[in-house]
Amino acid sequence: MKHGSKPVLGKIVAALVVVGLVAAAVAFWPSGGTKTVSGDFGRAVGLFPGSDVRVLGVRVGEVKAVEPRGESVRVTFEVDDDVKVPADAKAAVVAPSLVSDRYVQLLPAYTTGPEMRDGARIPQERTAVPVELDRVSQSLDDLMVALGPDGANKEGALTRVLDTGARNLEGNGENLHEMNRNLSQAVQTFAEGRGDLFATVKNLETFTGMLATNDAQVRRLNADLSKVSDQLDGERDDLEAALKNLAVALAEISTFVKDNRAVLTEDIDQLTSLTTAVAAKRDSLAATLDNAPVALSNLQLAYNPPSGTLDTRANVEGLDDPALILCSLLTGATGTGNANPNLCTTLQGLIPKGGLPGALNLPGLSAIPAAMTLAEAGVVAPPAAAAEAAAAKASSTEVLVRGADATLGGLLPKDTP
């Protein structure tokens, strides 16, 4: 049983292989069917039933009928079913040579998309035919007639044009050659600089776009420029006079500089030395400029106009403690220093703090008033001095010091109060 099963299995495998080959042959073997397509052409010269229908030069069918229809010709042809043609394909009549038969070319080749179905029609807008030789000849004949003695040259106009052109070009062959060469070089230069040229055009586009975006501001600028131009136009006489005067002044300055060249050179040298010195002392000058306003302000506040003096006030500390002042004076005068430490204690016990306003309150001394006149102090003044004092006291409550300079050495005006 086991030995007989191997031949049976081999037969089954062989049968399956044959069935597969047959199926593949059926799938890939042309079915032999066709689909009919028609197209409208302007002309169909050299196209007959049986002419080829091709795609990329490969025959895929044949023409079945050629039927004239007024101003067009309808060509009916068949295409093999296994050939895919785009639904929007075009058709052209191709003439391989002047004497051979023509064929219909379908284009473009199919790639993707809808396919052309059986019974489809290609309109005349999607068809093309070659130019016939007789039409070319007819066109040339029409041109010759138009330029001939019955046309443009009826009165010799064309002859005169040709004659004038011949006379103008005579002897200028070298110049024409040079012109063509220069033109080719110019074109080459433009071609080599096309990057810069296109960049310039792009920048101009950007600039014009910016102007368009800022149209209102540009219009306002133009209006302002127009106003300025009108103003300058109205003052052109004054401007002309100013320019004339400026010309005269420049001429005089030129003459002055020429006549005083040596003096100006010396002055400039000295000025250079001065500026060099000033530059060397710029830190000091800066400090002076910073401190001068404060110093002048203090001078003005310290000046006493009635007496013509600069008054100062010493802030001496310790005036409210006479014992401390006497202690410092006695120890400093005797040179005792700290040899007698009980001296200051004794003085502070004898003279209490704050006992000196108005009079010296030292033991054994009579009180002396803080202020008294010369007569009250027992000093007899000369008669003249007494008279002057009485007159000054009678005329003003302020007493001016004899010989005082009320102008502070000329810094202040003489009528300073």
Image (spheres, rainbow, N blue to C red):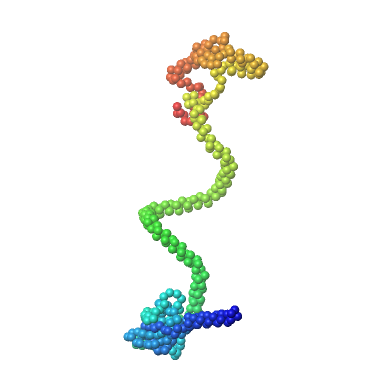
The image shows residue 32 at horizontal and vertical percentages of: 44, 85
Whether residue 408 is situated above or below residue 283 in the rendered picture? above
Whether residue 81 is situated above or below residue 388 in the rendered picture? below
The image shows residue 277 at horizontal and vertical percentages of: 59, 42
Residue at the image position 39 percent from the left and 55 percent from the top = 217
Q: Tell me how many marks there are.
A: 0
378 or 116, which is in the foreground? 116
Image quarter where the N terminus lies is bottom right
Residue at the image position 46 percent from the left and 88 percent from the top = 97
The quarter of the picture where residue 149 lies is bottom left
Whether residue 371 is situated above or below residue 255 in the rendered picture? above
390 or 65, which is in the foreground? 65
Q: Seen from this angle, which residue lies furthest left? A: 70
Residue at the image position 45 percent from the left and 90 percent from the top = 100
Q: Seen from this angle, which residue lies furthest front? A: 1
| Residue 166 seen in this snapshot | no
The quarter of the picture where residue 83 lies is bottom left
The image shows residue 398 at horizontal and vertical percentages of: 46, 21
158 or 49, which is in the foreground? 49
Residue at the image position 60 percent from the left and 16 percent from the top = 326
